[in-house]
Amino acid sequence: MVSLLPAGFSGVRLLRPRLLPATIVAMSALLAVKSVVLVQAAAEEAGQTSPDLKGGATQPVPAESRPTVPASLPIAAERKRMAARQAEASDEPATSAAERSLLMDLRHRREMLDARARDLDQKQAELEAAAKRLSERTDQLAGLQTKLEGLEADRQRHATENWAGLVRVYEAMKPRDAAAIFDALDMQVLLQVLDRMQDRRAAPVLAAMQPDRARLATQMLAEMRARSVGQSSTSPVATNPKG
């Protein structure tokens, strides 16, 4: 059999030139796949719309015309999920800060209300204690007043009894003897005795006393009786003893 190959060429050399077209075809296929992926990502980011060449408005791309992408390359969906997570992460600190501020404000107000309630309770307790002390003091003063009134009544009773005994002594004496004592007696004591003596017993004694002494005693006795009954003017007897 006669060979058509030139002399000096072998079968291996003939196969080497064929590897270059195969490599080009493989690279073209890979570039096509990448182009499809990029086109799908761009379509999903643009809202899966295509421009209308006639009206200028965008129209949704039919599902049949969308390029098919392998399930292992969800690039746009993953980007959207990452963007959503970042947005949530960026909003969470602001929301948390606002909630913390609100909680702190509410806690501060509650503390203020609790402090005010404690102050009111303390003031109420102090007022109740003061009212109790005042009531006890009032009871003590009332008891002391009752005791003083009793003592005053006893003193007046003893004084009345003493004056009554002294008056009986002078009423039993002769008018001249009693008049001699009244002329030298202290005026205040004399007035008390004359005021308590019966008129029919005092008249002879005053007649036997020295005229000036008797006139002065009569005037002062009238003024004393006028004060005791609340009169504003003196008695005619006091103003004019000789009449």
Image (cartoon, grey):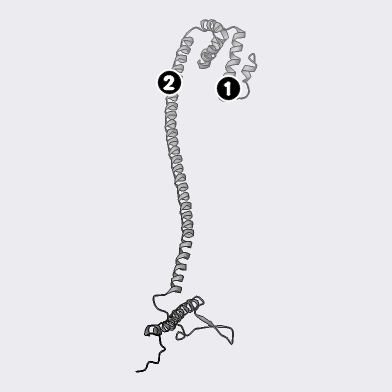
Q: Is residue 105 above or below residue 143?
A: below
Task: Residue 206: name its quadrant.
Answer: top right
> Residue 199 at what x, y percent from top left?
53, 16
Name the residue type under label 2.
Asp
Q: Is residue 96 above or below residue 145?
A: below
Mark 2 or 1, nearer chain start = 2
Residue toward you, 103 or 56: 56
Q: Is residue 57 above or below residue 138?
A: below
Local packing at callout 1 (Cα closer than 10 Å; few below 14, some 14-19, many 20+) is few
Task: Residue 55: name its quadrant.
Answer: bottom right
Q: Write the residue at 45% across / 38% down.
A: 127
Q: Write the residue at 48% across / 13% down.
A: 167
Q: Write the residue at 59% across / 84% down.
A: 56
Total label count? 2
Classify the position of the C terminus by image quarter. Answer: top right
Q: Write the residue at 48% across / 50% down.
A: 109
Q: Which residue is mark 1?
A: 227
> Residue 99 at what x, y percent from top left?
46, 57
Name the residue type under label 1.
Arg
Classify the position of the N terminus by image quarter. Answer: bottom left
Residue toward you, 152 or 58: 58
> Residue 124 at what x, y percent from top left?
44, 41
Local packing at callout 2 (Cα closer than 10 Å; few below 14, some 14-19, many 20+) is few
Single out the residue that lies furthest toward the front: 7
- Judged from the image, the secondary structure of the residue bearing numbered disc 2 is helix
Mark pair 2, 1: CA separation:
24 Å
Q: Are marks 2 and 1 in contact (CB under 8 Å)?
A: no
- Judged from the image, the secondary structure of the residue bearing numbered disc 1 is helix
Q: Which residue is mark 2?
A: 154
**Which of the two discs, 2 and 1, sits closer to the camera?**
2
Image side of residue 133 versus residue 213, left or right: left
> Residue 54 at what x, y percent from top left?
59, 87
